[in-house]
Amino acid sequence: MGARQSSAHSKDKSPKRMGLLWGRQKFSPWEDTMLPGKDPRSLLKRGMRHVSFSLVTKGMTDIPEFLWGLSEVQKLNLSHNQLRVLPPEVGKLSRLVVLNLCGNGLKSLPRELSLLRSLKVLFVNMNCLTEVPAELSSCRNLEVLSLSHNCLSQLPASFADLSRLRKLNLSNNYFVHIPICVFSLKELDFLHVGSNRLENIAESIQCLGSLQIFIAESNNIHSFPRALCLLTSLELLNLNNNDIQNLPEELYLLCRLERIAWNPMDKGLHISYNPLSKPLPELVEGGLEMLFSYLKDKKHN
């Protein structure tokens, strides 16, 4: 009798039996196409470094339940759907290294993101976020964070604990100043705060000594802070389309800025579309060497 029970129990867990169970679940039309009696694990892509799973542009309004059972997933792409909620079950995917939620309609993020201790890259750009949970700061391995194109005006103070963060995109939000916690992120080499509501750049910007790319275009910044001139690792500085009239004499200290840049993708100094006072517009047209020479002479004279 016991042997028969054991045999029956083993049948229930056979791959064929599991396939039938998955087949009986009700899925949306696109899920039916993906999972005609399949174990969802068959959809995992096993690369050289990561196990990945992608449901991009599927028109999803909800995340399928089977996903939370795929605990081995390391790269998950749910971008460009119609998701309104990210369920707390996302915390079950503890091996996640990359999570892409770009281009949905998320208004908030669950606190359970704090359970993703291996997470290195998080894209939540192009959503409807008005705040970010302080618990996200528990993801101490996070290196890349994109929060652009949301409705954010502040960040939790606890973000100062993201000591490994190297790239931060806060562009196209409602920030009136760069959040104080950002100045604690000593490893940052990329910071994008363009298209916000900034009127100034705090002197604390000088704390970001590793910064190589700083973009603050399309704000209402009135002055070019001298503190920026202390960031001698800068290779791209974009202050286009602001309200800057004067340039600091110490600008020549930014010796890694190789040129006046006109193409948005080029390295160098971007200073177009500002009401620069004379003779600065002509000097900018003449190139960076001419501009630096003028500012250096002005300082020493």
Image (spheres, rainbow, N blue to C red):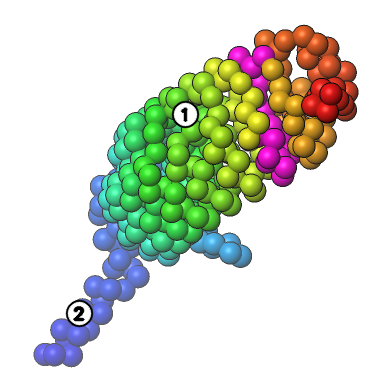
* Quadrant assignment for the N terminus: bottom left
Residue plotted at (20% across, 85% down): 6
Disc 2 marks a residue whose amino acid type is: Ala
Q: Where residue 23 appears, x then y in whole percent? A: 30, 55
- Can you say whether 36 is above or below 202 in the image? below
Residue plotted at (22% across, 84% down): 7
Q: Secondary structure at mark 2?
A: helix
Residue named by callout 2: 8
Q: Where residue 273 appears, x then y in whole percent? A: 68, 13
Nearest to the observer: residue 90 or residue 148: 148
Distance (Cα) linking label 2 and label 1: 65 Å
Nearest to the observer: residue 231 or residue 20: 231
Q: Where residue 71 appears, x then y in whole percent? A: 38, 63
- In the image, residue 153 lies in the stretch drawn in magenta: no
Nearest to the observer: residue 105 or residue 181: 181
Q: Which mark is residue 81?
A: none
Relative placement, left or right, of 108 versus 181 is left
Residue named by callout 1: 177
- For the record, the magenta segment spans 228-245
Q: Mark 1 Cα within 10 Å, few/some/many (few <14, many 20+)?
A: some
